[in-house]
Image (cartoon, helix red, strand yellow):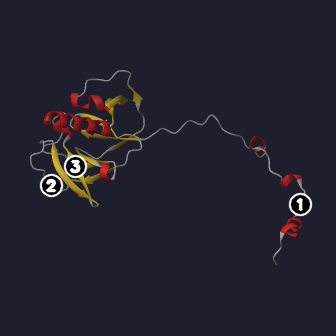
């Protein structure tokens, strides 16, 4: 049965009742009461943030928070003629060409394992994606203690490391891959002039 206008309101019992009138937002928010026997626990410890880190030679680097990343097994890399030796070439990742860099070579580090890395870490997506060779799969880290002073690091990384953390006996550097690759691009452009 279709009702219209006032007959519908009166049939639903809505006409002229104060409980159906709109409240001011501050009044609506202050009306909330916890049911009897419940309490709001403000003593609960905040959950520890999990970060992911990867290793290149003797260097431990943290992936930027909320950065898209994925690890793929080593695949053939198409070389780019006349490029720097640390730019290994390109890979085709879901129809996107992704440059692959040897971060150990850029930073003049020896690899922990003989030969090149076994894994490729892809950072970001689409046209912004870049990849680096890594020595092992990334690890999840949760108990990060901020360092007051950063230890020495490769010169090539200085502009891309904002801080560091201690996890047990290891130091992990906060790696801003976007700043690093922009700096690398700028230095290549200056060298070409």
In this picture, residue 33 sits left or right of residue 192: right
| Image coords of residue 9 (percent x, y) | 86, 65
- In percent of width and height, residue 72 lies at 27, 54
At a point 89% along the width and 55% down the height, the residue shown is 17
- The kind of secondary structure element at disc 2 is loop
Quarter residue 67 falls in: top left
Residue at the spot 60% in from the left edge and 37% down from the top edge: 44
Which of the labelled discs sits on residue 15, or is there none?
A: 1
Q: Is mark 3 on a helix, strand or loop?
A: strand
Q: Nearer the viewer, residue 106 or 38?
A: 106
Residue 32, image quadrant: top right
Regarding residue 37, the answer to whether it shows in the image is no
Q: Residues within 10 Å of mark 1 (few under 14, many from 20)?
A: some
Disc sitting over residue 99 in the figure: 3
**As drawn, which residue projects farthest toward the top?**
149
Quadrant (top left, top right, bottom left, bottom right) of the C terminus = top left
Number of other residues with Cα within 10 Å of mark 3, as a class: few under 14, some 14 to 19, many 20 or more: many
What residue appears at the point 66 percent right and 38 percent down from the top-left corner? 41
Considering only vertical position in the picture, is 159 above or below 38?
above
- Measured in 3D between alpha carbons, the distance from the residue under mark 2 to the one under mark 1, in whole angstroms, is 75 Å
Q: What x and y, as percent, mark residue 83?
A: 12, 45
* Residue identifier under label 2: 78
Crowd band around label 2 with a 10 angstrom C-alpha radius: few (<14), some (14–19), many (20+): few
Residue 23 in sight here: yes
Q: 189 or 54: which is nearer to us?
A: 189
State whether residue 20 is above or below residue 24.
Answer: below
In the picture, which quadrant includes the N terminus? bottom right
Q: Tell me the element at label 1.
A: loop
């Amino acid at each position: 049965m279709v009702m219209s206008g006032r007959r519908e309101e009166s049939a639903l019992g809505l006409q002229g009742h104060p409980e159906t009138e709109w409240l001011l937002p501050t009044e609506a928010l202050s009306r909330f009461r916890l049911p009897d026997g419940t309490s709001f626990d403000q003593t609960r410890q905040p959950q520890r943030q999990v970060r992911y880190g990867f290793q290149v030679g003797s260097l431990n680097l943290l992936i930027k928070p909320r950065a898209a990343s994925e690890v793929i097994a080593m695949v053939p890399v198409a070389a780019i003629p006349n490029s720097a030796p640390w730019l290994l070439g390109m890979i085709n990742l879901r129809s996107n060409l992704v440059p692959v860099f040897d971060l150990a070579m850029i930073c003049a580090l020896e690899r922990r394992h003989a030969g090149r890395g076994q894994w490729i870490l892809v950072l970001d997506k689409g046209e912004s994606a870049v990849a680096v060779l890594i020595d092992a799969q990334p690890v999840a880290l949760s108990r990060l203690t901020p360092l007051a002073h950063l230890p020495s690091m490769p010169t090539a990384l200085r502009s891309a490391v904002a801080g560091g953390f201690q996890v047990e006996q290891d130091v992990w550097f906060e790696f801003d891959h976007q700043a690093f690759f922009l700096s690398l691009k700028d230095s290549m452009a200056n060298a070409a002039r």
